[in-house]
Amino acid sequence: MRVCLASTSPARLMLLRQAGIEPLILSPGVDEDAVGATAEAERGAPLTPEELVLLLARAKAADVVGRLAAQHPDFDGIVIGGDSMFAMDGRVYGKPYTAEAARERWERMRGATGVLHSGHSVFRVRPDAAPVEAARVAEASVTFASDVTDAEIDAYVASGEPLLVAGAFTVDSLGGAFITRVEGDPSTVVGMSLSTLRSLAIELGVTWTELWTSH
């Protein structure tokens, strides 16, 4: 049973490898801002964080599924798509991209608690059948240390790590020392909830251990 990861996220790849899975990697060709804007325009109102991460996860997975038949016609397995966003005090935070934005966020997050929303879309793909999808959102709350100093924030931002991750933090690398509590599946904060992926695979008739490629 093969696994295709519809993402170029190093954190998501690391999670799967740590779980004994070596996936095929295909980058989804999805304009995330355009997908979200279109959905909000059609509704006439903003999407909730849960709705947005699920929408984007499904769009990414579907895009890759649509290309698999041509690129890998014998593919028999599952395709995984994901998206994450961090919400705190009624605001949604994606990737900060700039040092200034990352520093401002850390000044707000210091001593606070927010929720990491992670959308998951899994497709069962076979050469001789139409793809079938199961999708779900997982959430985990994250509490940040109240005594993080300005100098520590400056050093963390200067490392470059928080600039390209949802919420401007990691729990499994340099940012982990500044986090005091995680409630929920810890892997959700890394990039994908492994327990959620297992549950979705089961819905699609796939046993998680079938996906192991290393032990």
Image (spheres, rainbow, N blue to C red):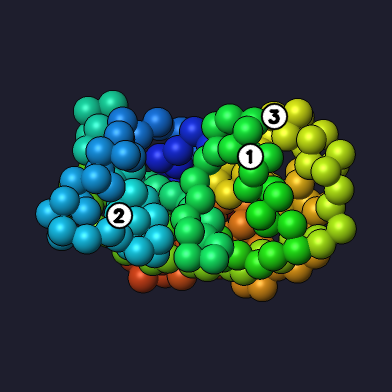
Q: Amino acid at mark 1?
A: Ala
Spatial CA span between label 3 and label 2 = 28 Å
Spatial CA span between label 1 and label 3 = 9 Å
Q: Amino acid at mark 2?
A: Leu
Which numbered circle lies on residue 102?
1
Q: Are marks 3 and 2 in contact (CB under 8 Å)?
A: no
Residue at 40% x, 61% y is 49
Which numbered circle lies on residue 190?
none
Residue at 69% x, 65% y is 112
Q: Nearer the viewer, mark 2 or mark 1?
A: 1
Say what secondary structure mark 2 lies in: helix
Mark 1 or mark 3, earlier in chain: 1
Say what secondary structure mark 3 lies in: loop
Q: Amino acid at mark 3?
A: Gly
- Above or below residue 125? Residue 91 is below
Q: Position of residue 175 (x, y in %)?
A: 76, 46
Spatial CA span between label 2 and label 1 = 25 Å
Q: Position of residue 32 (x, y in %)?
A: 33, 40
Q: Which residue is mark 3?
A: 160
Residue at 55% x, 38% y is 96
Q: Is residue 211 visible?
A: no
Q: Nearer the viewer, mark 3 or mark 2?
A: 3
Q: Which residue is mark 2?
A: 55
Q: Position of residue 210 (x, y in %)?
A: 50, 57
Q: Are marks 1 and 3 in contact (CB under 8 Å)?
A: no
Say what secondary structure mark 1 lies in: helix
